Image (cartoon, rainbow, N blue to C red):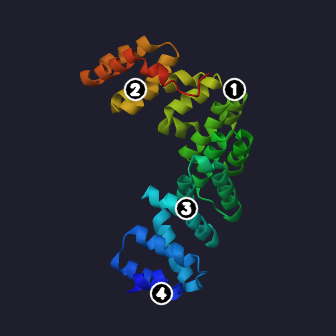
Amino acid sequence: NLEALTTYCGDPEAYLALLKVYRVTKAPLEKSIRTASLMWQLRPSSASETLVQNIVEAAYSEPRSPEIQKQYVDFAEDVWRSSGMTNGRVGITIVNALGPEQRPRAIRLLLEYLEKVATPNAAVIVNLISLLRESGAIADALMVANRFKATAENASFATAWAKLALEKNDASQAKKILADPYFRIGAIRAEEPITAYRLLRLAGSEQALSVLAQALDSAMASRDMQSIRAVADIYFEEGRDREFMMVASERLPSSLFEEIQIERRSGLFRRRTAKYSN
């Protein structure tokens, strides 16, 4: 019995054989990663190292089994480093498994990744900018954004970049970002219109009102409560709640409008006031 053999001896070959059995029988992820982590401590051969790397990639290429990912995150990071840190998706999942309490470690890990990889994963760049912003390192986050702005041209990157100005309520920085030829305000308008509105409003742009009107129209058309609440927050912040409620009464089904009324009476919108205000 291979499982019994690995329990009572430290033979790497027994672990390797057991992992191969798990792969063929499609054993639960927890079994494979636990066995792989134990074998890794025995300094495996290059052949078994490849198998371990494959197991870690399978376990950390997407956000699944969060408890297992948290439990074996140190092992996963060690294996990812040994593989050259080439798989950005694995790095993101490791960072997520580390959690906010280990944010400095996560930042160091992603900075190291950026130095090692010639063409970094855009999602890693976005995650790093967000982590730096959340830790208050706005200047460092801006350096990362400026370093990769010519290549990471997507809505997520533009949104993360915009939030750096919003974090500090910095009108001059908002204007600078909007004037940058690499910044894509159109991408944010489509994906995160509320962020686009806040940035334009902070910069004093005349486009802000049209963006907000578009966001309101899209939210009402979608009938998605999360989108509706996000737009409602803006209107309530700015003392335009009657205007919002009038549009909502005309555009929403009675059941959704009643839900909005209940939340309004409870003061929920005011308590949910967004962080990025002017």
Q: Nearer the viewer, mark 2 or mark 4?
A: 4
Kindly identify which residue carries mark 4: 14
Q: Position of residue 277 (x, y in %)?
A: 59, 24
Q: CA distance from mark 1 to mark 3?
A: 40 Å
Q: CA distance from mark 1 to mark 2?
A: 27 Å
Q: Which of the 4 image quarters holds residue 44? A: bottom right
Residue 170 visible somewhere in the drawing:
yes
- Marking on residue 217: 2
Q: Is residue 145 left or right of residue 225?
A: right
Q: Residues within 10 Å of mark 1 (few under 14, many from 20)?
A: some
Q: Nearer the viewer, mark 4 or mark 3?
A: 4
Residue name at image x 73 percent, y 46 percent: 143
Q: In the rendered structure, which amino acid carries the disc numbered 1?
A: Ala
Q: CA distance from mark 1 to mark 4?
A: 63 Å
Secondary structure type for disc 2: helix
Q: Nearer the viewer, mark 1 or mark 4?
A: 4
In depth, the one of 109 and 140 nearer the eye is 109
Residue name at image x 65 percent, y 25 percent: 203
Q: Position of residue 197 (x, y in %)?
A: 55, 28
Point out the image quarter for the C terminus.
top right
Residue name at image x 55 percent, y 32 percent: 196
Q: CA distance from mark 3 to mark 2?
A: 44 Å
Kindly identify which residue carries mark 1: 171
Q: CA distance from mark 2 to mark 4?
A: 63 Å
Q: Position of residue 79 (x, y in %)?
A: 59, 70
Q: CA distance from mark 4 to mark 3?
A: 24 Å
Q: Earlier in the sequence, mark 1 or mark 2?
A: 1
Q: Residues within 10 Å of mark 3 (few under 14, many from 20)?
A: many
Q: Which of the 4 image quarters holds residue 45? A: bottom right
Find out whether the residues at labels 4 and 3 contact each other: C-beta distance under 8 Å: no
